[in-house]
Amino acid sequence: MDTLDPGARQKRAGQADASGAFRALPDESPMRMDVQSLSAWPDTHGRPRTPVTEPSMIALRRLAVIGSACLLTGYGAYEMNRVLNSMGLSVLGAVLLVLFVLLFQWIALAFTSAVGGFISLLRHGGLGLGITRDGPLPALSTRTALLLPTYNESPGRVMAGLRAMYDSLAATGRLDDFDFFILSDTTNPDIWVEEEAAFLALRAATGGQGRIFYRRRPVNTERKAGNIAEWVRRFGGAYPQMVTLDADSLMAGETVVRIVAAMERHPGVALIQTLPEIVNGTTLFARMQQFAGRVYGPLIAHGIAWWHGAEGNYWGHNAVIRTRAFAEQAGLPHLPGRKPFGGHILSHDFVEAALMRRGGWAIHMVPGLAGSYEESPPSLTDIAIRDRRWCQGNLQHAKVVPTRGLHWISRLHMMMGIGSYITSPMWLVFLLAGILISLQTRFEKPEYFGDTKSLYPNWPHVDPEQAKYVFIGTMAILLAPKLMAYVALLFDRAACRGCGGALRAALSVLVETLVGGLVAPVAMLIQTSGVISILLGQDSGWNAQRRDDGGVPFGDIVRAYWRYMLFGLVLGGSAWSVSIPLFLWMTPVLLGLVFAIPLAAVTGSRGAGQALRRAGLLLIPEETAPPDILLRAAAARAALPPPRAADAIALLLDDPALMAAHRAMLPPPRRAGDPINADLLVGLLKLEESPDRTVAVAVLNRAEKAAVLATADGLDRLTVL
């Protein structure tokens, strides 16, 4: 129940001005947010170097994780050297050994971090900051804004998710402490006007005129980071906290209340990141992603939370942020140089967390708190598109790592982000170097005694027996986290039942591992090609993410994956010609590449995903016993009208109320000295020559239509058609 009187609510909401005109935004409450220097020491404003919320013995935890990983790597390097040293020193052998050490360090750190996560999971950790999973909800004393940025997304899906979160917060009795902002960067004019119509419908359905707001930026400068920063500079002064979301995010009302209350209790904390669980997957690929996220994800997240402590990371959504800390420290500069490495920072979340920690604020993760959700791209093709953008953003961090004053854990976050992509070309080079060494040992004439006089010959060969043990040990370290995650699942009886029981969960782990293993070589080549294209100067651009489960046409799959199939055939033929044992050893990699086309088609298939669901495989508790927030979102989506092609001009001209609201939400008119919008000039000229609405709709391209609909002059010309 709203505790504010109608006059106060109207003033706070900015729903109407003195004349009663419609307003979509509250009164502005500006907050200063300066761009930070990466070369100057930050001003910490007297905050302690070590946050008071830092867990005890954090140094020992880090020593245990990183030190153990280094010891494992040292032992692995020793054993790998034994595999190669009988050949004597060679360039290929040195390359192979160096690559092995770098790649083994990567999987060793993942393993030791997972061990920490296993300990934390068995102790039911992963919370901290006084947050509880159950019990009475805490009272709140400040206002919080929920920010939902959107970019050319389906307005119905976006508003359905927001409606679910609105109703979930209302059920907590804490709705008065929250406002909701839809921050649109949409460039498609048809989707833009649909957004406005959906926003008005959501307000009407919820009675949220004083709590639900909408703003569209006419120019989406600096993408999502710029979208959030613009809100902070205009409205941040009225909200001590903001909860950042993605277009596919869902957060239960209780979860939001608990993390906001923790933020209020700990004034030195800048950010609390939850662990979003992947849900609503229907294709085989999406269901594999959500099963892996649900079963292995907690182990990984508990592990990094266990040793990151107050130097946690930010994943860009499903987190609560202290607005003052963000405004004070997280103003992102442009990186020097041209795209793709220069310009605005794409993967902004890692950098924002690092800069806030640099400024003396604590960054925490609470993976043990349920009620945070997101969705996965439905196919390998879709995740490759998203991955290309993430790859460019992470590689940009090479220019951020040297930033003065960063905590070493923050630097490690960014280096690990870079490593998550450059390891793909490293694996490829490692694979090719192994083939070349085998080729060398077959065709190069050996010198048994060399230049020295010796009674005993030097037999130059790769030790196959020792190589087998190194391979088995490496695979054991690589797969052990999955086994630990499964064991931890068995200790959580409710979650185990939700995954179909112990046997079906084990079979699901096997299916995910086998299919994931086949996909891995294809993903390796996709990421490698992405890294190469970025190094060659190609920018990733910014495209909307496909979220539905509509299959990719088979012709598109063939065009996208034939080169990987061809590479697999060439690689397999080369291995066979060198050595049959080498060919057999490479079979897992070769199978994934040779069958790249059918593999991409099957994993992107809704039918294959649903067949496994009917068999009780790849199940997660959130679909066998859906929590309240997911039920609310599903009901809101089911209530949406069937999708139809909508034209912005027709929508506005046929709905006077929508036209009036649209006019009220227009950006300020152009001022003298502002750049001239060529699309607007051309669009207005085309309207002058259009005899009716139908012709106007046909002759305007997307940019011209958007420009026309963003000005009162353009709308006036449309209304007389």
Image (cartoon, rainbow, N blue to C red):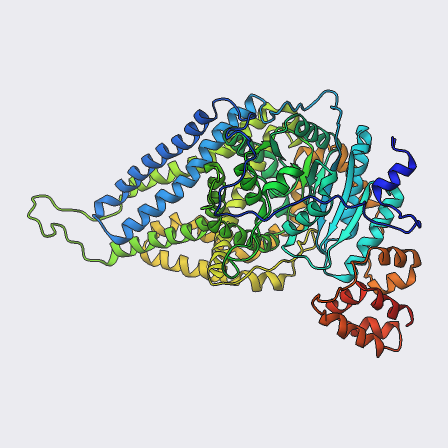
User: Furthest residue to the bottom?
Assistant: 689
Q: Residue at x 62, y 41 (%)?
A: 326
Q: Quadrant of residue 172?
A: top right
Res 411 seen here:
yes
Side of 383 where 60 appears, left or right? left
Q: Is residue 325 above or below residue 398?
A: above
Q: Nearer the viewer, residue 635 or 37?
A: 37
Q: Position of residue 642 (x, y in %)?
A: 83, 53
How far from the left and from the top, in percent, is residue 552?
65, 58
Residue 460's x, y, as percent?
20, 49
Choose top left, top right, bottom left or bottom right for residue 7.
top right
Across and down, in percent, residue 165 comes to: 77, 38
Q: Is residue 467 left or right of residue 699?
A: left
Given residues 439 and 209, the one toward you in this image is 209
For the N terminus, the image quarter is top right
Foreground: 717 or 537? 717
Residue at x-position 67% and y-position 54%:
546
Above or below: residue 340 compared with residue 22? below
Q: Quadrant of the C terminus?
A: bottom right
Asked whether residue 247 appears in the rendered view, the answer is no
How many discs mark residues in the rendered view? Answer: 0
